Amino acid sequence: MTINYEKFNLKEVINASGRMTILGVSKVSETVLAAQKFGGEHFFEMSELSIQTGAYLAQLLKVEDAQIVSCASAGIAQSVAALIGEGSVYHAYHPYTDKIAKREVILPKGHNVDYGTPVEVMVEQGGGQVIEAGYANMCTPEHIEMMITDQTAALLYIKSHHTVQKSMLSVVEAAIVAKAHNIPLIVDAAAEEDLVKYSEAGADLVIYSGAKAIEGPSAGLVIGKKQYIEWIRLQGKGIGRAMKIGKDNILGFTQAVEDYVNNGSESGALMQARLAPFITALNAIQNIEAKIVQDGAGRDIYRASIKVKGAKSAKEVIQELRAESPAVYTREYQANNGIIEFDIRSVNEEEMNKIVTRLTTIMH
């Protein structure tokens, strides 16, 4: 049986927007596909599969324990539930019970963002109540500290390009506050590329997306303190049941992490080298000025940025790029300023040439 775009009446997509959920996030390698195939063709004791793959990844990442979940969002919800329930089976069966009052999760105000769903939705799904600290343009350790009460269950830090970047406390600073008050710190590092940094900075639980930087199948990873990870596993009897992950993706993701640790990801220098001829071709198109820019959150990621001039707005160009097949998806965060960015991590040379051809037609 042949699987292709035409079978389901779908457009081909060129993903120049980055590792985005709306496009299926990333491509997986042959080794990951082989691991998924093994998982799909065999049976396992699922509880043991969860424990043993977690132990394997924990050893690989030099942390106490790890748990594979269905996605990073599930990681937030289940981590919050775990820290509220503290290993109580009663809580797992009754996650929103009035018998447990310690439910406050302190979050910098500038971190309460919508990344496809609001952060607070996932906190509330885990039974937590968001308490915002600081202000939209500033959050200091003191702002966090002044919000702590005897009802505080956890601190939550979102490390993402979606959040406010300036005048925000660091993960290390958040960890110092958490440790001083004996409160666990959760760091959501979904799209981050460093799988060690935040644990070393003092976070008790760190959450990663499986399909973003790691380029695995749909999955999420929570790493950290062994007791907390065990509490997360317990959520399989509660809210985690609606977020379970299949055996094929557990094994595929485990292989993806191993490959990522061994091989790393494309360096910023290599991205810039691949971008150079693309930038030259873009600058040859009328009403376009192109340059290379670094990721706004400071990651070692470089993109093509174009300034759209002339009669058409950047938003109109974005719509036209998506309209045909292949549909070209871009980063549109600065479209209101006439700027479009192209993330080439999942774009090959042939696809870059197609983008140039399409833009030439659109801007003519």
Image: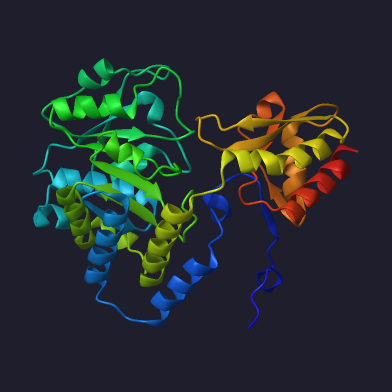
Q: Quadrant of residue 356?
A: top right
Q: Position of residue 278 (x, y in %)?
A: 76, 41
Looking at the image, how many numbered discs can be counted on the residues?
0
Residue ID at (19%, 37%): 184
Residue ID at (20%, 29%): 178
Residue ID at (22%, 70%): 48
Q: Position of residue 190 (x, y in %)?
A: 41, 44
Q: Quadrant of residue 76?
A: top left
Q: Quadrant of residue 13?
A: bottom right
Identify the image quadrant of the N terminus: bottom right
Residue 210 is at least partly visible in this image: no
In this rendered view, identify the residue nearer to me: 351 or 255.
Answer: 255
The colour style of the image is: rainbow
Q: Position of residue 14 (x, y in %)?
A: 69, 53
User: In the image, is 320 to the left or to the right of 267?
Assistant: right
Identify the image quadrant of the C terminus: top right
In this rendered view, identify the residue nearer to me: 361 or 237.
Answer: 361
User: In the image, is 22 to the left or to the right of 13?
Assistant: left
Q: Position of residue 215 (x, y in %)?
A: 50, 55
Residue 120 is at least partly visible in this image: yes
User: In the image, is 325 to the left or to the right of 115?
Assistant: right
User: In the image, is 263 to the left or to the right of 333?
Assistant: left
Residue ID at (40%, 59%): 258
